[in-house]
Amino acid sequence: MIEAARPSGTHRIVGFGSAVFVSRAFALAELSDPRPRINSRILASIDSGRSDLLSKAQLRCGNTRGGLDMVILFSSWRRDALGMEDVSEVCATTAGRFLEQHLGYRFHRLIMETVGEEEAAMICGFSVKWSADALH
């Protein structure tokens, strides 16, 4: 969650993101047969009692051996309350917080589903360069 230092009108929360670590089998199944609504399948797995989310033990093991698969469930900002300069600041802050919160995790892959052409264009416009040393 990103809170504005100087709230715009009545909006203090201006950005939000969430992500989960998933099993390698789930990630591979999703990548081999991409379909809309990945978040719904994750929630359905939890509801069924056969969660595709990693337990603490699986998280430790995956981080030690071969890396982790993560699904970014949601990442957005208040389009109705921010100007372009503010959007840029929120995006930079969100990326920085993501990296801070996941220091020490060894990622195998990150998966994110976009919703709509605007979001896809925004995500495709990002240039991401990972330094393995920076994330371990």
Image: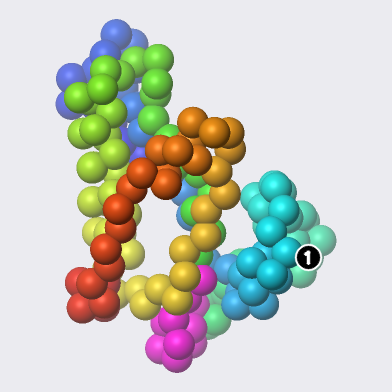
The answer to whether 84 is drawn above or below residue 58 in the figure is above
Residue at which label 1 appears: 49
> Which residues lie in the magenta part?
59-69
Instruction: Give coordinates of residue 41: x percent, y percent.
Output: 73, 55
Picture residue at 54% right of the left edge, 81% below the top: 58
Inspect the image, locate mark 1, and give the three-letter code of the amino acid beneath it. Gly
Asked if the stretch drawn in magenta spans residue 134, the answer is no
Picture residue at 81% right of the left edge, 61% below the top: 48
Instruction: Give coordinates of residue 25: x percent, y percent.
Output: 67, 77
**Extreme top residue here?**
9
Picture residue at 57% right of the left edge, 49% below the top: 113
The answer to whether 76 is drawn above or below residue 95 in the figure is above
Q: Is residue 26 visible?
A: no
Task: Indicate the secondary structure of the residue bearing disc 1.
Answer: loop
**Extreme right residue here?**
48
Q: Quadrant of residue 136?
A: bottom left
Visual colour scheme: rainbow
Q: Quadrant of residue 92?
A: top left
In front: 120, or 95? 120
Mark 1 neighbour class, 10 Å CA radius: few under 14, some 14 to 19, many 20 or more? few
In front: 91, or 35? 35
Picture residue at 72% right of the left edge, 53% below the top: 35
The answer to whether residue 85 is left or right of residue 66 is left
Q: Is residue 33 visible?
A: yes
The answer to whether 122 is drawn above or below residue 51 in the figure is above
Asked if the stretch drawn in magenta spans residue 62, the answer is yes
